[in-house]
Image (cartoon, helix red, strand yellow):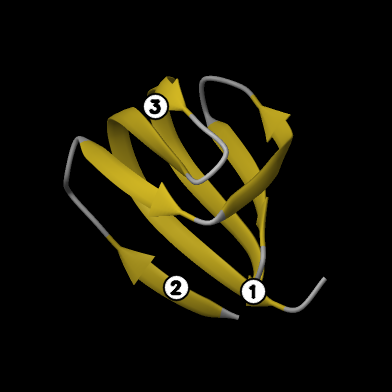
Amino acid sequence: MQTIKEKEYSEALAEVNFILEYTDKLIRIQTKLGKIHVIGRNLQIEFYTNDEMKIVGHIAVIEFHEGG
């Protein structure tokens, strides 16, 4: 697992396969390379296409878990 600490208010993610979990505190996403966990407050998905997604809110931590 890799952890990326962020103080940004939005993050664009590429190669999104599907959403595993979506709350205002946690968004878990399956990508082609692994799972991404976005942890924070007031999280919202601003847009979501077959290829990318934009998450807004107060992002505290982004975790990447390699593989399925």
**In the figure, residue 28 lies in which quadrant?**
top right
Q: Amino acid at mark 3?
A: Arg
**In the figure, residue 67 lies in which quadrant?**
bottom right
**Residue indicated by mark 3:** 41
Decide: is 58 above or below 59: above
Q: Residue 4: horizontal and vertical position, in percent?
A: 35, 69
Check disc 3: other Cα within 10 Å, few if <14, some if 14-19, many if 20+.
Answer: some
Q: What number is the disc on residue 15?
A: none
Decide: is 3 above or below 44: below
Depth check: give the residue in front, 17 or 55: 17
Circle 3 — which element? Answer: strand
Q: Amino acid at mark 2?
A: Thr
| Quadrant of the frame with the N terminus | bottom right
Q: Earlier in the sequence, mark 3 or mark 1?
A: 1
Q: CA distance from mark 3 to mark 2?
A: 17 Å
Q: Earlier in the sequence, mark 1 or mark 2?
A: 2
Depth check: give the residue in front, 34 or 43: 34
**Residue indicated by mark 2:** 3
Decide: is 27 above or below 47: below
Depth check: give the residue in front, 1 or 50: 50
Q: Residue 46: horizontal and vertical position, in percent?
A: 36, 19
Q: Residue 32: horizontal and vertical position, in percent?
A: 67, 66
Circle 2 — which element? Answer: strand
Q: Earlier in the sequence, mark 3 or mark 2?
A: 2
**Residue indicated by mark 1:** 33
Check disc 2: other Cα within 10 Å, few if <14, some if 14-19, many if 20+.
Answer: few
| Quadrant of the frame with the C terminus | bottom right
Circle 1 — which element? Answer: loop
Q: Residue at x 65, y 26 (%)?
A: 22
